[in-house]
Amino acid sequence: MSHTVFFRGARAGTEGPAVLRPSGPGAPSPAPARTRARTAVGCALLAAALGAGATACGADGNPLAATPYDAADEIAFNGPVKAGGKADPDKPLEITAKDSGGRITDVTAVDSAGRHVSGELSADGTRWHSTSPLAANAHYTVRVSTEDEDGAPGRKVLTFDTGKPTSTKRLNVMFGPKEGTYGVGQPITAMLDQPVKDRAERAVVERALHVDSTPAVDGSWYWVSDRELHYRPEEYWPTETEIEVYSNLENIKISERLWGGAAEPLELSIGDAVVARTDAAAHTLTFYKNGEEIKKFPVTTGKPGFETRNGVKIVLGKESLVQMRSSTVGIAAGSAESYDMPVYYATRVTWSGEYVHAAPWSVGSQGSANVSHGCTGMSTANAKWFFENVREGDIVEVVKSKGKQMENFGNGFGDWNVPWSKWRTGSALASGGQDAGTREETARLAPAPL
């Protein structure tokens, strides 16, 4: 049986988990072995003189509080020992306790970029080995804590460099969206420039992609395809959340022919909680801000054969003027359903062309009937107000429509329609997780903007 010690990947200058006890700057200098021997004898004699009721070993009377001794003679290390030697980044790091009665109690390994190495320590403390890949072309510092047969603490700091990658092929990552302030529904995206299909290789990639937020929330990546990941929390982001997205993948081995490349970090802010809920049966859109109902508009949604999608969507962008043409969605020009018209104050919610927009031609039906080709139409004044009061990432939800469900992926961000229990299985790190979802069909409305 073994005990697994996890070191969460971190950026330069950050600390590892609090449960670990690595030495750090300012740690006491190691004591010579002969001093340690004299200390042990002195403690025994002093304990006998004072009686069973009192002992005094180390600075505070505890043997474990003694200055750590140099544990170099008690451990073996499989890294390079000669000056200028390079460790093979393809091989795991291993530290073992020599047959001297002592044991290893703790190991931390971190490179100069602040990336910690995960490792596993055997139950008897005789062996520690890395369980996550080392980075190539990196400088590592390894801090080893030990304990001798008398319980006295030892410590040794090892350093080494790793060699070049065996392949020059790199996997680069681009995070999205662009830096800025977004609504509470905005997912984080990671686009890969090469496909990653193998589950173990996906796990290497995913471990290196980090999303830190203030306040902290529980979230997870989901493999949408072999080139795309999305990240979201269980619930919508809290208002005023600050988000930092970054990668520790550079120079990490992913496969025999693929190593991690660089990625630009990303910082985002989350604004107010805006939710626009359209009731297609009641023909109304209710605008909520931070839980408070602000406005209710009469609207029209998709008519039979062109019903608006049900479910949660998010604002993808805003276009003050869009030229909508029926020919882009397969409706022949000149037919009874054809159209070619300018549309104002268009707030996009799907890539295929579903908008909330001004529809002055249907004002007489707004609030009483559904007559559109799938969009949510309202008066020009109401559409202008809506346009000016939403931002990318805000929630637009449709209920009680006779249309199909919003696609989860591939036609905007339908991410929030995936139950959290299922979302977690889309992670390559989830136990028993499934393969990434595939992009769903592109739907029917696709107007061409001017």
Image (cartoon, rainbow, N blue to C red):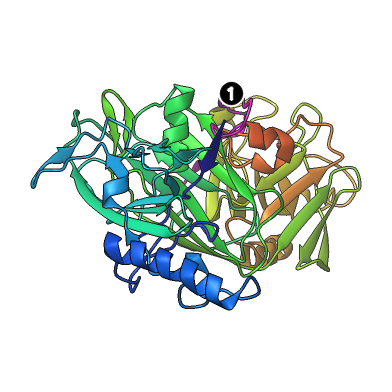
Reading the image, the residue beneath label 1 is 330
Residue nearest the viewer, comparing 92 with 423: 92
Q: Residue at x 60, y 66 (%)?
A: 241
Q: Residue at x 19, y 28 (%)?
A: 167
Can residue 183 be spotted in the picture?
A: yes
Residues in magenta, as a range: 426-450
Q: Residue at x 77, y 26 (%)?
A: 305
Please state the horizontal and vertical placement of residue 135, each as a whole percent of the image. 28, 42
Residue nearest the viewer, comparing 223 with 148: 148
Counting every numbered tag in the picture gives 1
For the stretch drawn in magenta, the main secondary structure is loop
Q: Using the image, determine if residue 232 lies above or below residue 429.
A: below
Can you say which quadrant of the picture contains the N terminus?
top right
Residue nearest the viewer, comparing 399 with 448: 399
Please state the horizontal and vertical placement of residue 335, each as a whole percent of the image. 65, 24
SS at mark 1 in the image:
loop
The answer to if 449 sits in the magenta stretch is yes
Q: Amino acid at mark 1?
A: Gly
Please state the horizontal and vertical placement of residue 405, each as a whole percent of the image. 75, 32
